[in-house]
Amino acid sequence: MAVSKKVEQTVIKEDKFYTISAANGKVVEVADYNTDNGARIQLWDNANAEWQQWSFERVGEGVYRIKNRFTQKVLDLYQGGVGDGTAVHQWENAFASSQLWVVDPGNDGRVKIKSSVSGKCLDVVGMSTENGAGLQIWADVNGDNQRWVITEVTRKPKAAKAAAKAKVETEPKAAEEVKPAAKKAPAAKKAPAKKAEPKTEAKTEVKAAAETKPVAEKKAPAAKAAEKPAAKKAPAAKKTAAKKTTKAAK
């Protein structure tokens, strides 16, 4: 009972914000600080960011809406599902039973957060401990991936831009290692430049052909000129023979 009172003193303060931490210290957050309905809920290293902080709005005895500080949207069950494996995402407050959660304190200072409509626990998909692990609901199996530590935020959160930048810097550097490989790709495209050499030879051949044409054209007129005088002499010979024949007849 003393434990329950302790949880009550912590969670019921509606003017406070809290982190919800898994067993490995990672906290529940809205993925990529997305403000849209349906944005994914996941685990990530605590960056003291507003999208990793939550308020608990009491709607009944031990029953709460859990609202994100940054997006102002609440934890919600995908399509109102109640079965094992139903994904947890964020949605605007619709006063729906799929958005109501019961905080069930344990004996070790941790709590189980259960769907009010199904009684199933907030659970880490595949019991993953990695950044980006998704959240769902699952039957209570008393596992570590279903136990949470709710801690009041006492530090001023980082500005959204600063927190986002810090998060990007802590992500795996695998993407950076791929970049040099991408830069090498253009080098392969330079190889076709060698094809330019045959083009110069082709141009040279065309020029050579062009230079030889005028020589052939110049010779042709010379041959024609030689033939023309011969054609003019033939008529002269015929006229002389005709005159001699006429005198003989006289």
Image (cartoon, helix red, strand yellow):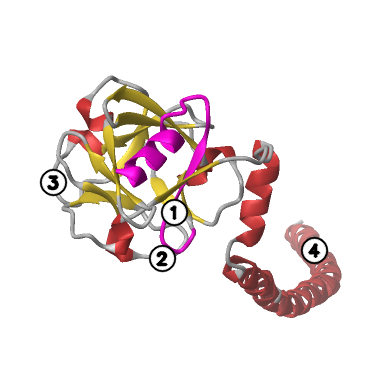
Question: Quick check: can you spot residue 88?
Answer: yes
SS at circle 4: helix
Three-letter amino acid code of the residue under disc 4:
Lys
> CA gap, disc 1 to disc 4?
131 Å
Name the residue carrying label 2. 129
Q: Answer with mark 1 or mark 3, whichever residue precedes in sequence.
A: 1
Please rate how many residues cluster around mark 1, counting C-alpha atoms within 10 Å: few if below 14, some from 14 to 19, many from 20: many
Residue 8 in which image quadrant: top left
Task: Give me the residue at 35% from left, 25% from top.
Answer: 58
> CA gap, disc 2 to disc 1?
8 Å
Three-letter amino acid code of the residue under disc 2:
Thr
> CA gap, disc 3 to disc 2?
23 Å
Q: Answer with mark 3 or mark 2, whichever residue precedes in sequence.
A: 3
Range covered by the magenta-colored residues: 1-25
Task: Give me the residue at 82% from left, 72% from top.
Answer: 207
Task: Give me the residue at 65% from left, 39% from top.
Answer: 157
Please rate how many residues cluster around mark 2, counting C-alpha atoms within 10 Å: few if below 14, some from 14 to 19, many from 20: some
Name the residue carrying label 3. 83
* Quadrant showing the N terminus: top left
Name the residue carrying label 4. 244
Determine the residue located farthest toward the top in the rendered image. Answer: 95
Question: Quick check: can you spot residue 37?
Answer: no
Position of 181 with respect to 4 (left or right) is: right
In the rendering, at what x and y percent does residue 224 appear? Answer: 80, 67
